[in-house]
Image: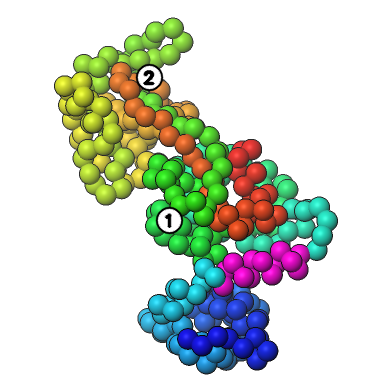
């Protein structure tokens, strides 16, 4: 591809390219840009001519990017972000005047333990901000951060090892606890906390959070090191349903402590210390380094961390 002649290129077309990439639909991109659909289609035609590539191919759901568009978008996003920073008015950032949609990729765990506790403060400080929550695995989340489709990602576990081009801020540390229905006969009180003997823990039926339907997890590895096994009689793709199943049965489960604390009264649960050692983990706010100092991104990051 030959070098682009900037004297003949309308840089506003890059804003159109960004919207088409984010929406994957000409009509929705037009709405995002406050343009007519015909004007957006005409801009896409000009982009295709400028880059000598289709850039987006129509499909039943809208449009899909070509390999060249996929290659271009990280650089386009960085260029537009630099322009926005230069063009932003100087002075202190006021979230109360912010009118924007902030895109956040988060697991169900992060929505419950990070976003939910922070939501009232976010709404009070920035009533015109819209949070667009999206699911994402590591690969797709990092790709969307690169492309500017996401402002931040709330991740843990597999997000702990990510490339240096991303900035990570600690939200909190998390650990596992056991849950059982209130009054479960296998619970034993020691001091101020409830416990369960290893024999009972291994004997009782377990409910396992397993998005893919696997019947084995970190608990099984820890039990195996002790020469023990457990019986998993239910696997559930969503951790949000597990406390209610535990509260209504003799089954037990191992879940994140913050989840258990938030749901113990509603689901009629007791929390107990585990009779085996499991690793802790960190919940992180992840941002593209080039956007970490952008006022809105920095503000929403601080709101998430402060909770």
Above or below, comparing residue 60 to residue 238 in the picture: below
Between marks 2 and 1 in the image, the one whose residue lies nearer the viewer: 1
Span highlighted in magenta in the image: 76-88
Q: Mark 2 vs mark 1: which is more N-terminal?
A: 1
Give the distance between the C-alpha atoms of the residues marked 2 and 1, in whole angstroms.
31 Å
Above or below, comparing residue 297 to residue 221 in the picture: below
- Magenta stretch, main secondary structure class: helix
From the viewer's side, name the closer residue of 134 and 76: 76
Local packing at callout 1 (Cα closer than 10 Å; few below 14, some 14-19, many 20+) is some
Name the residue carrying label 1: 136
Q: How far from the left and from the top, in percent, is residue 261?
A: 48, 29
Q: Which residue shows up at 55% across the image and 38% down it?
A: 171
Q: Is residue 214 left or right of residue 33?
A: left
Give yes or no for residue 9 being in the magenta stretch.
Answer: no
Q: Which residue shows up at 55% across the image and 53% down it?
A: 287
Give yes or no for residue 86 being in the magenta stretch.
Answer: yes
Q: How far from the left and from the top, in percent, is residue 101?
A: 62, 62
Residue 273 circle label? 2
Local packing at callout 2 (Cα closer than 10 Å; few below 14, some 14-19, many 20+) is some
Q: Are marks 2 and 1 in contact (CB under 8 Å)?
A: no
From the viewer's side, name the closer residue of 170 and 216: 170
Residue 108 seen in render:
no
Q: How far from the left and from the top, in percent, is residue 55?
A: 46, 83
Quarter of the image where the C terminus is located: top right
């Amino acid at each position: 591809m030959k070098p682009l002649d900037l004297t003949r290129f309308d840089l506003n077309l890059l804003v159109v390219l960004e919207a088409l990439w984010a929406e994957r639909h000409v009509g929705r991109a037009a709405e995002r840009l406050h343009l007519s659909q015909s004007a957006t289609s005409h801009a896409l035609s000009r982009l295709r001519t400028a880059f000598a590539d289709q850039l987006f191919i129509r499909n039943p759901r809208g449009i899909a990017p070509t390999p060249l568009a996929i290659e271009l978008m990280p650089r386009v996003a960085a260029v537009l972000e630099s322009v926005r920073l230069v063009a932003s008015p100087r002075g202190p950032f006021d979230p109360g005047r912010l009118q924007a949609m902030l895109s956040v990729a988060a697991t169900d765990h992060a929505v419950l333990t990070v976003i939910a506790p922070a939501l009232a403060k976010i709404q009070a400080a920035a009533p015109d901000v819209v949070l667009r929550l999206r699911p994402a695995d590591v690969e797709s989340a990092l790709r969307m951060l690169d492309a500017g489709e996401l402002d931040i990602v709330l991740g843990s576990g597999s997000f702990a090892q990510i490339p240096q081009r991303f900035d990570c801020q600690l939200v909190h540390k998390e650990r596992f606890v056991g849950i059982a229905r209130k009054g479960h006969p296998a619970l034993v009180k020691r001091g101020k906390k409830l416990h369960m003997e290893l024999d009972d823990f291994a004997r009782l039926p377990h409910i396992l959070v397993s998005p893919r339907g696997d019947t084995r997890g970190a608990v099984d590895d820890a039990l195996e090191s002790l020469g023990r096994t457990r019986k998993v009689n239910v696997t559930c793709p969503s951790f949000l349903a597990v406390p209610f199943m535990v509260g209504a049965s003799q089954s037990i489960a191992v879940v994140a402590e913050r989840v258990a604390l938030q749901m113990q009264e509603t689901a009629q649960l007791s929390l107990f210390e585990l009779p085996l050692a499991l690793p802790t983990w960190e919940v992180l706010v992840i941002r593209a380094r080039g956007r970490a100092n952008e006022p809105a991104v920095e503000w929403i990051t601080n709101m998430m961390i402060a909770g």
